[in-house]
């Protein structure tokens, strides 16, 4: 939230205290619903119903949609049945479903009771689809036309029912069995002759997803093709809904947050950081810390095994952290590049060999650069014996190469096995690279230094 | 790129060899331009001009826009002046600018020569804006109306000039000095009465950005408000362009890639991994590896300083990696949460104290959990002396708390100082946490173990 927003929240409270309701209403009327919802976050709970009732009538539902779930639940609890019905009537079905999915059962029951039977049927329909599917993301309020309509008949239909549709920018043409047979934009329609028949001006070369397509895939495709909406069809290619670009954008942002969190060893949730409680934050983080601690036991065991070598050359200890952190970083550079490439659909299994070769080469050049730089430093500044410096630098070079190869192959392997590549990144790669770097280090030390 | 796409590329080559051009044209006609561009990537360079000429006329420019810069440059080199002019005429100005920005000067000169004077003026105008600004991202091909037009006059105008505009879904109302005074959607227009005057039905409560607004900020706002386009105004609030949702989506994805790369210590570029050459990849990665190596010198120095302690209790060495990796991970969990929160505008300076308190608490609970689990393991499995186990666990707990506090405060500090918070994440936090964890470890060891 912005600084200006916080200020606005204080202003709102002041106006409330001074009962300047009319003025407040005018201010709200000039704002974006999303920004009003942000102000609501900073208003004490007991004032929320009052402020909500000050909102201009035609904005109330839009602000409601943008609010966080706790505040929605609280407001619903305070609504009369009539008020609840008014809000529900204003919501698009997909927004209603999003809210229902987050509410406790008792609230859901009350909400469903206030919707008309047709909407209730539609809501239940969408609720059936898996959480991450196009079906759960889509809206059913698209505008469909028939192929034998003329352009002017189409306009009549748009004027008649366009108000209740989530978008009229893209129009879908279906046959009598609701199969999707064409697409056209409102622009096509406006630029066509009134007597043209839809069949002749529609685009028949249609990209669509099914209700079960993963929602991230839907969002990626929509973004790649620069669509404003993506049609969703069932197994029989009947049009059942559309995913609009604004929802696709939200999906992309959520998936990005998820990937970034996984890269850092955090169990992803869809709640923003600032709204996650202490216990919840703890639960998102502690599993990975525990796993990493346990896996660090391996490195401990390796060190213990080479205790004699370390006893003879205590100086070797001083360079362990450098070696491990260089390896860890080199590995995460590779893994993150690959994970992102996979997420953006730029990389594919058929590229595996090419990637391994590239990472090996990059690793070798990086390794040599670091080894040379480090050797110079060890000789000039630390004034180490040459043989010790050689041990450190040789281990450094091999560690970097190994780290790059592990870093690039584990995410691809993870995807192949059906896991999210991002989950592989941090803990597993770190552990593996740490262990390998230490083994290489000590092996080279025992050979060169004759320990 | 998908597996199916690769297959298609082979098919295309086969058809080329067998001169089945007509068939190929039909296949292209049924595809998305973005997918055709992906196929082009796998076609040998010398065949590109041939394949390009097979494309259906009305698709050629769209495919051209989606191709990578090297292929665009090659194609332009092969174009006759007439062909080049045909492509340029089909391009939207913002796409033309994107391409021009990536071409060498000689190609730019040739391109500008083939555009008409008005377009050339517009291109030069956009080229003036800073790279990351709304001005460089916007298109100037928006559709504007006058406030005193009637709805039916507006439709006449849309039908007349709508074809050349990048979007007609959102329409902008300007006064005689081009000031932005209203916005309306094509839906508003369609649902209005033909005799209604634009002034009476337009939305006057407008959110706009200026030409110098950072493009990431533009994309975030557009996404937050679920807009299809964001108007861009100059300092005098004159409308100069719009940013469309598809470009905003691309910006968000690029910024996400940038953040993820920075988190992993990679210098960000806007080139996909698979298209980045070995030398370029090396250049993106080596600086951070070098910086980290140098900063690891500090940890080395700390270890050397406590050589005596380590000589007396070699067992302490075995737990150094565990301590450092736990600290590093705890720190990156915090920093990544904060960096993401800042990027999504969920967090703000005014939250700093709240964040510090939360991270301290979460750090304390995580630290205690890890310390207890570790203590049990050290006593039961490793059978360490109690005093050594206490040293390790106390250091572990304090390290986690310190790591959480450093991890959350550095990104906020970075933002305050005007840097990208993501750049702070990995190298600096790791170095700081490593150093602190070692100092804490050895300090506690010297006290408890009386070394």
Image: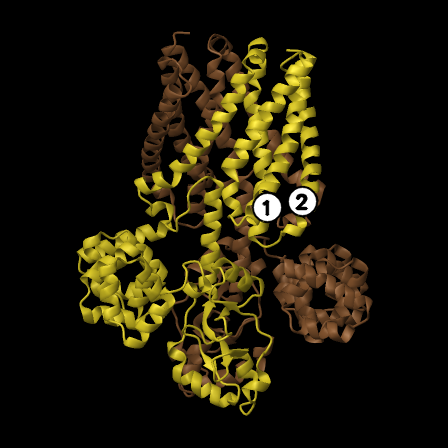
Chain colours: A brown, B yellow
Q: Earlier in the sequence, mark 1 or mark 2?
A: 2
Q: Where's residue A404, x and y in %?
A: 40, 33
Q: Give residue A224's quadrant in the image.
A: bottom left
Q: Find numbered disc 2 in the image and state the secondary structure of the residue it sits on.
A: helix
Left or right relative to B355: residue B144: left
Q: Where's residue B350, x and y in %?
A: 67, 51
- Mark 1 and 2 residues: CB-CB less than 8 Å, in contact? yes
As rendered, which of B287 and A262 lies closer to the eye?
Answer: B287
Q: Where's residue B23, x and y in %?
A: 24, 64
Q: Chain of mark 2?
A: B
Q: Is residue A420 visible?
A: no
Q: Find numbered disc 1 in the image and state the secondary structure of the residue it sits on.
A: helix
* Above/below status of A199 relative to A337: below
Which corner quadrant holds the N terminus of chain A? bottom right
Q: Is residue B62 visible?
A: yes
Q: How far apart are the alpha carbons under marks 1 and 2?
A: 10 Å
Left or right relative to A171: residue B403: right
Q: Chain of mark 1?
A: B
Left or right relative to A2: residue A309: left
Residue at the far bottom in the pictured view: B195
The residue under the point 63% across, 64% down is A34
Left or right relative to B385: residue B140: left
The residue under the point 32% across, 50% down is B6
Q: Give residue A385's quadrant in the image.
A: top left
Q: Where's residue A432, x and y in %?
A: 48, 27
| Residue holding disc 1 | B412
As rendered, which of B424 and B345 lies closer to the eye?
Answer: B424
| Residue holding disc 2 | B355
């Amino acid at each position: 939230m912005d600084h200006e927003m916080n200020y606005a929240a204080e202003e709102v409270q002041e106006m409330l205290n001074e009962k300047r309701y009319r003025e407040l209403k005018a201010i709200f009327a000039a704002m974006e619903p999303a920004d009003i919802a942000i102000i609501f976050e900073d208003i004490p709970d007991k004032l929320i119903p009052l402020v909500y009732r000050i909102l201009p009538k035609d904005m109330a539902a839009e602000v409601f949609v943008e609010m966080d779930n706790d505040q929605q639940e609280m407001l619903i609890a305070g609504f009369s049945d009539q008020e609840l019905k008014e809000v529900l009537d204003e919501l698009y079905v997909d927004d209603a479903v999003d809210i229902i999915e987050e509410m406790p059962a008792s609230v859901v029951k009350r909400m469903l009771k206030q919707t008309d039977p047709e909407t209730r049927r539609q809501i239940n329909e969408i609720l059936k689809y898996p959480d991450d599917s196009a079906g759960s993301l889509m809206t059913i309020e698209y505008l469909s036309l028939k192929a034998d309509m003329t352009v002017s008949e189409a306009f009549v239909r748009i004027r008649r029912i366009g108000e209740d549709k989530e978008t009229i920018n893209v129009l879908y043409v279906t046959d009598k069995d609701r199969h999707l047979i064409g697409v056209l934009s409102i622009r096509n329609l406006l630029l066509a002759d009134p007597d043209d028949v839809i069949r002749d001006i529609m685009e028949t070369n249609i990209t669509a997803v099914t209700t079960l397509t993963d929602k991230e895939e839907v969002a990626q495709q929509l973004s790649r093709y620069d669509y404003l909406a993506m049609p969703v069809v069932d197994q029989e290619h009947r049009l059942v809904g559309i995913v609009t670009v604004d929802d696709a954008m939200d999906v992309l942002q959520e998936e990005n947050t998820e990937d970034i969190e996984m890269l850092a060893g955090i169990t992803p949730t869809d709640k923003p950081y600032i709204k996650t409680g202490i216990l919840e934050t703890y639960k998102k983080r502690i599993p990975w810390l525990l796993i990493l601690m346990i896996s660090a036991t391996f490195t401990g065991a390796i060190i213990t095994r080479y205790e004699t070598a370390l006893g003879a050359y205590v100086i070797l200890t001083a360079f362990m952290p450098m070696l491990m952190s260089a390896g860890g970083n080199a590995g995460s550079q590779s893994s993150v590049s690959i994970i992102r490439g996979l997420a953006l659909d730029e990389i594919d299994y058929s590229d595996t060999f090419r990637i391994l070769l590239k990472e090996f080469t990059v690793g070798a050049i990086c390794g040599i650069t670091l080894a040379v730089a480090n050797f110079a430093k060890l000789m000039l500044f630390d004034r180490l014996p040459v043989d010790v410096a050689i041990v450190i630098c040789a281990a450094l070079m091999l560690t970097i190469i190994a780290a790059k190869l592990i870093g690039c192959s584990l995410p691809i392997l993870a995807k192949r096995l059906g896991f999210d590549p991002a989950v592989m990144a941090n803990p597993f790669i770190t552990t593996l690279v740490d262990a390998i770097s230490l083994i290489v280090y000590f092996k080279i030390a025992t050979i060169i230094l004759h320990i």
